[in-house]
Image (cartoon, helix red, strand yellow):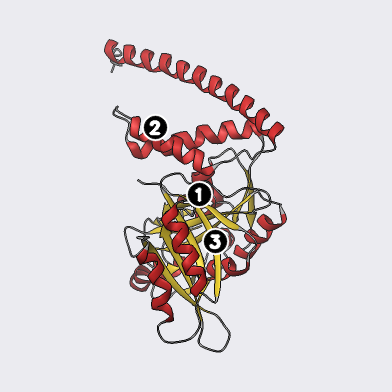
Amino acid sequence: MAEAAPNPELLALRDRIDAIDRELLALLNRRAAVAQQVGELKKHEGSVVFRPEREAQVIEGLKAANAGPLAATGIAPIWREIMSACRALETPTRVAYLGPAGTFSEEAALGYFGSSIERVPCANFDEVVRATSAGTADFGVVPVENNTEGVVARALDLFLTMPLFIIGETSLVVRHNLLRRENAMAGIRAVVAHAQALAQCHGWLSLHLPDAERQPVASNAEGARLAGLDASLAAIAGSRAASEFGLHVLAPSIQDEALNRTRFAILTHPERHPAPKASGHDRTSLVVSVPNRPGAVHDMLVPLKRHGVSMSRFESRPARSGQWEYYFYIDVEGHPDEPAMAAALRELREVCAFFKLLGAYPVDTH
């Protein structure tokens, strides 16, 4: 059967797209050239290359100015990649995260910084903090909480003593897949994954693999690597890990909650990077403790109410002192540069036995 002749209208539209792509490439190179000039000025002044509040303001401004068919949700990832490529012309950005390749932490790092980074995969969260503290990496990415399983306890414990502070955050839709070397469900002896992933898929595993052992490992990607070596194992991980280790996706999206999201914090060292300035859409994170006496927790919250500061997260962790004392991890909306927030934090510090500002940083409003 003879192949139909190409539609002339379609060919004309493709030619227009090709022409626009060439215009876009020329404009991107013009932008990159200006970014190189900015980089030279920054080197002369000794200022940092990455400014999260500046990038957040640029993206928010573009979203506000968008009047075309392009969805607002698509603008941020496009411009993060553009900014990442231009930033790489100034200096490489080294980012530490829970490895190996194919983890959700790696995906979060790429989503926040763009793909033009130097990747520093680490064996565990402690190594991420250690690499960022020592300067092996410029930034670290660690998960903080999941909307179904709650906080990542080890990350919060590290926040208490680490010399780093938070300069940004990103959240990731987490879709867990059951992966295996063999393209069949029969014969699975054990499921290997990070403890959080096993918990997030508890219902599915109980229904479909009730006899399989559940073995927690350092990361989902590590579980995928092990499953690639042992046909009796299945892993829980994302599609990146399946591609990385040559595994079949036996069952997609096996998480118990459809809207499964994990929030990640972006960390850096204060001696190598300044705290972000107020961007207009900011969050402040802190950890505090109060004296063990009646009404102490109430007194801790009064300054926030008095100055109209909204609290978006309140978590407690044992202080491990043997005295039933706790540390409280708090997120509030706003920035310490703002008068109301500054006053609230000043009064809060006065009633706390321990007070540590973990960071103030821009947040995505979409």
Task: Measure the alpha-carbon separation of dots 3 and 2.
Answer: 29 Å
Q: Quadrant of the C terminus?
A: top left
- Looking at the image, do the residues carrying marks 3 and 1 touch, with CB atoms under 8 Å apart? no
Q: Is residue 141 above or below residue 11?
A: below
Residue at figure coordinates x 37%, y 37% from the top left: 74
Residue at figure coordinates x 67%, y 50% from the top left: 137
| Horizontal side of residue 52 vs 77, given as left or right | right
Specify few, some or many for label 2: CA neighbours under 10 Å numbering under 14, 14-19, or 20 or more: some
Residue at figure coordinates x 54%, y 23% from the top left: 31
Horizontal and vertical percent position of residue 305 = 35, 66
Front position among marks 3 and 1: 3
Q: Is residue 142 above or below residue 91?
A: below
Specify few, some or many for label 1: CA neighbours under 10 Å numbering under 14, 14-19, or 20 or more: some
Mark closest to the chain's N terminus, 3 or 1: 1
Mark 3 residue element: strand
Task: Measure the alpha-carbon separation of dots 3 and 1.
Answer: 23 Å
Mark closest to the chain's N terminus, 3 or 2: 2
Mark closest to the chain's N terminus, 2 or 1: 2
Give the amino acid type for the residue marked by disc 3 in the picture: Leu
Horizontal and vertical percent position of residue 320 = 57, 83
| Horizontal side of residue 319 vs 201, given as left or right | right
- In the foreground, 24 or 322: 322
Residue at figure coordinates x 58%, y 31% from the top left: 86
**In the rendered image, which residue does mark 3 sit on?**
358
Which numbered tag is attached to residue 2? Answer: none
Give the amino acid type for the residue marked by disc 2 in the picture: Leu
Which numbered tag is attached to residue 107? Answer: 1
Which numbered tag is attached to residue 62? Answer: 2
